[in-house]
């Protein structure tokens, strides 16, 4: 599943061809995302595509789980190692981000918000329990957080860390 924020058709075709040469059983679904759907959110580094994760529970209605990876992830191991860690009782499984202690803690604390240094995670690679995201209304709560805090430092990552907090593994 490709969340497309402006990939040229010929580039997408080249991507599909390249992957299918190596993995012949691959299939692709392309979701063209319109940045205007994020008009209520603050820009982050000049764009709003960082909020694309917010569409996952809606776009993938029939999926209970999804692995989300930013396009700059370099895979050096079998993705099945992550997939096999799915836990029906955990909202999100992510990668610990020690940099948050330096960058996010001051912002959170200056606004009277709790910061969990041992649970702070990076949004670049996530194993998301979409069923629990929907049930717990994580996207709606994250949008509310962003509306209340338009000066966030790391956009959706700040929101997810605040809303999900210690429910991450």
Image (cartoon, grey):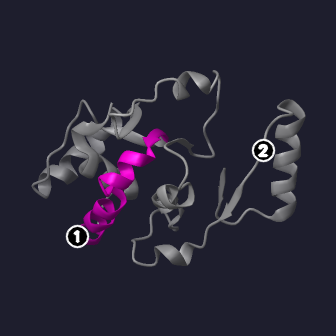
| Labelled pair 2, 1 in contact (Cβ < 8 Å) | no
Label 2, label 1: how far apart the Cα atoms are: 40 Å
Residue farthest to the front? 62
Residue bearing mark 1: 148
Quarter the C terminus occupies = top left
- Tag 1's secondary structure? helix
Q: How busy is the neighbourhood of tag 2: few (under 14 within 10 Å), some, or many (20 plus)?
A: few
Q: Earlier in the sequence, mark 2 or mark 1?
A: 2
Residue 126 on the magenta span? yes
Which residue corresponds to the image point at 76% horizontal and 49% vertical from the top-left? 28
Q: Position of residue 166 (x, y in %)?
A: 22, 37
Name the one closer to the observer, 128 or 109.
128
> Does residue 39 belong to the magenta stretch?
no
Give the mark count.
2
Seen as rendered, the residue at the extreme left is 112
Question: Nearer the observer, disc 2 or disc 1?
Answer: 2
Q: Quadrant of residue 154?
A: bottom left
Task: Name the dominant secondary structure of the magenta segment.
Answer: helix
Magenta stretch in the rendered image:
125-150
**Residue 54 location (% of width, % of height):** 45, 59
Looking at the image, residue 44 lies above or below residue 38: above
Q: Residue 145, relative to residue 29: is it above or below?
A: below
As helix, strand or loop, the secondary structure at mark 2 comes to loop
**Label ID, residue 89:** none
Q: What number is the disc on residue 27?
A: 2
Residue in the picture at 41% in, 40% down = 122
User: Which residue: 27% across, 67% down?
Assistant: 144
Left or right: where does residue 73 sit relative to residue 87? Answer: right
Q: Position of residue 137 (x, y in %)?
A: 31, 58
Badge 1 density bin: few <14, some 14–19, many ≥20, Cα 10 Å: few
């Amino acid at each position: 599943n490709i969340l497309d924020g402006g990939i040229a058709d010929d580039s997408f075709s080249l991507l599909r061809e390249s992957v299918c040469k190596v993995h012949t059983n691959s299939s692709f679904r392309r979701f063209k995302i319109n940045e205007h759907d994020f008009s209520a959110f603050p820009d982050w580094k000049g764009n709003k595509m960082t909020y694309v994760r917010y569409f996952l529970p809606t776009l993938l209605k029939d999926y209970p789980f999804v692995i989300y990876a930013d396009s700059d992830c370099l895979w050096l191991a079998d993705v099945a190692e992550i997939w096999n860690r799915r836990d029906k009782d955990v909202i999100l499984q992510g990668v610990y981000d020690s940099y948050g202690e330096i960058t996010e803690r001051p912002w959170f604390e200056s606004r009277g918000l709790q910061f969990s240094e041992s649970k702070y995670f990076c949004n670049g690679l996530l194993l998301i329990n979409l069923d629990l995201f929907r049930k717990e209304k994580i996207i709606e709560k994250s949008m509310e957080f962003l509306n209340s805090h338009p000066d966030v430092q790391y956009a959706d990552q700040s929101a997810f860390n605040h809303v999900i907090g210690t429910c991450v593994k």
